[in-house]
Amino acid sequence: MQGRHCVVFCCGFAVAVMSGAAAGEDRPDTETGFFSKLSHDRTVGKYGRGRDTTIDVTALTLGYASDDYSFDVMLPYIRQSGPGRPIFIAGLQPTVIAGPIQTVSGAGDVTSSLTRYLLNEEEYGVDLDLGAIFKLATASASKNLGTGENDFAVQSTLGRSFGGFNTSLTLGYAYVGKPKGGNYQNAFYGTLDGSHRLDEDLTAGLTYSAGSSVVAGLVGTRDITGYVAYKLNKRLKLEAYYLKGLTVQSPDRGGGISLALDF
């Protein structure tokens, strides 16, 4: 498989925010070495209300990858405008709950991920990864930029290629930090991704994502994302995506762009 699939819904920002990355993101192309990514994502949705809530996330991701594992840390900056309060949880699409009309901005929760590559397709016929995502409560809860609690998610990805086509399935479970007065609960999530390498440098794909609700009484999230990735050279890769939400708790639409650099 051309690049092992490593979903970091990151993005705990999934996909969407997408982990601060486009859905269907491959394992960093570098076999052993450091990598970085600069990304910007925007989602817009009514979330059952009469007015749009817009969430912008600009993030810097720094990491290291080898043949056996990868590790990264994402440092996000968030701007939210509109009614409601966004709830960012490790591994999941943000949930927007009832809140005042506001425009706030500031540093988001620092999120890190660790992935262990257990099987590779060349030897075993499939790629199998096991990963963990940690969201640290560094964002301001008083400004509604975070819950004030840490989160932890575990996930596994199974992938296989068919000629120029790559497919992968990710299943995960988030252990949600529960602040006092919040009706939060742990949640399952998953993604199904398919991509096609159009030529040596250009890849296009689709990702379907779903997650159960982290707030009791609300529906879960479901969305579909189309993305393209283009290698500018051996070290630089440009990615862009467009997202369409499928439930009232998903954003109506979203999009993002990122530039990744291997050292």
Image (cartoon, rainbow, N blue to C red):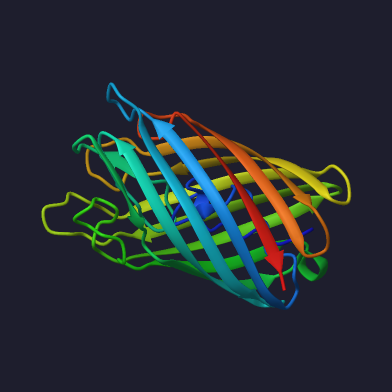
The answer, for residue 10, to whether it is visible in the render is no
The answer, for residue 244, to whether it is visible in the render is yes
**Percent from the top left, x then y, of residue 241?**
62, 40
In this rendering, the answer to whether 67 lies above or below 105 is: below
Name the residue nearer the viewer: 167 or 70.
70
**Residue ranking furthest to the left:** 181
Q: Is residue 136 left or right of residue 253?
A: left
Residue drawn at the location 84% of the way across and 47% of the way down: 164
**Residue ranking furthest to the top:** 50
Task: Give the position of the N terminus as an image quadrant.
Answer: bottom right
Residue drawn at the location 51% of the way across and 42% of the way down: 209
Q: Is residue 172 left or right of residue 119?
A: left
Task: Give the position of the C terminus as an image quadrant.
Answer: bottom right
Which quadrant of the structure image shows residue 260?
A: bottom right
**Percent from the top left, x then y, of residue 17?**
47, 47
Residue drawn at the location 32% of the way across and 35% of the way down: 219
**Percent from the top left, x then y, of residue 49?**
27, 25
In this rendering, the answer to whether 233 lies above or below 72 is: above
Name the residue nearer the viewer: 233 or 11.
233
